[in-house]
Image (cartoon, rainbow, N blue to C red):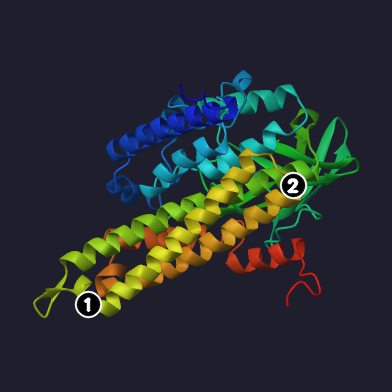
Amino acid sequence: MSAQPAPDASAQAERDDQVRLLRDSVTAFAAGRLPLTRARKLRKAQPEFDPAMFEELAGQGWTGLLLPEEFGGFGLGFAEARVVIEGLAAQLAPEPIVPVAVLAAGALRRCAKTAQRDDLLGALAAGTAVPGLVWQNVAGSLELEQPPFTAVPAGEGWTLEGEARFVRPGSGATVYLLLASTPQGVALFSVEPGSSGLEVKHEAQADGTSLARLKATKLRVNAAAALTLVRADLAAALDEALVMNAVELLALITRMRAMTLDYLKTRVQFGKAIGSFQSLQHRSADMLIQEELTRAVVGQAVAALDADLPQHKRTSMASRAKARAAEAAMSTAREAIQLHGGIAVTDEYDLSLYVNRVLSLVPWLGNAQAHRRRYVRLNPPVAGSEG
């Protein structure tokens, strides 16, 4: 009689089956409900996504995958979140799953328990709340030592001053979570769009979405709007969003390479499919190498999140994944354009949609260069480690 698998191996096999079933479900949903024609239609729309579709995604359980069951979530891990995000990104769905269901949700669930926090998490899982986390100053720093806003006590509430940029979703958020320094430390302040003293501007992106720029001038909020947390917890939420941003980029890389291979097989020149030319085969192989390297690094980063490693390790893996994915996405987009020729940059051709999405997602949360520098700061070379 063969030996029974160890309990850990059995549990992992069960989870792998669960992930496969989820991937099949996401793929079927995306193919049927999220055609590329929809992505075209929603470009430059206000809001930039369909709130009804966001609620439909919530109905599938996907906005609450990472949330505890007490808030209507499923309490699953990042392996499950990955397949949802990959499936939606491959179809260019503009619904802000990573900014909302990963970044904002990750920050909220780490805040001290209050009725306001619990209500927001429940509404997020239900798809009726779309919070946007406002944490980067106008210079776009990745560090958290200097929050973009300051909050001072004022009567029974607070007064906020400051300015921030690079907020996703750029339009359509139902509430903003402003990161501010207070006399007691840092806190998130929930503020509704249209509040007196809050100015919101939209900065257009290449793919038709936008980033929000917020300015607070004598912005008054009540005491219940303050949600306390520590910087380390916010940093952990940012690590998670970085890895899932890399997952989005990997989905785009995969789709751009597949489209390019299909084109090389069907485009005929000198009586032959151009994919038969050896020089183009070499370039196709280079694209495959970039994709597989990215897939390996992203997979390691996702596993690191699920393993709940120390924050230093998680941050290192997150920056490594984003740097690799961002660089590979840009190089794949360039190769795809060159191998297609002029048709690649026409608005009617679907490849242009993917290239423009790459141009929008690569800078968000820091580009490849910024994360390479960050990785080196976290892991400085040791003298004498070589040779």
Q: Tag on residue 311? A: 2
Disc nearest the viewer among 2 and 1: 1
Element on which disc 1 rests:
loop
Q: Please, what is the three-letter code of the amino acid marked with disc 1?
A: Phe
Quarter of image, res 331: bottom left
Quadrant holding the N terminus = top left
Residue positioned 41% across, 62% down in the render: 356
Q: Residues within 10 Å of mark 2 (few under 14, many from 20)?
A: some
Residue where numbered disc 1 is placed? 277
Residues at discs 2 and 1 in contact (Cβ within 8 Å): no
Residue 329 x/y as whole percent? 46, 63
Residue, far left: 271
Residue 81 x/y as whole percent? 51, 38
CA gap between label 2 and label 1 equals: 48 Å
Q: Tag on residue 332? A: none
State the count of labels. Answer: 2
> Of the residues under marks 2 and 1, which one precedes in the sequence?
1
Q: Residues within 10 Å of mark 1 (few under 14, many from 20)?
A: few
Residue positioned 56% across, 24% down in the render: 73
Residue 30 x/y as whole percent? 34, 39
Check the image and report above or below for 163 versus 177. below
Quarter of image, res 156: top right
Residue 132 makes an appearance in the image: no
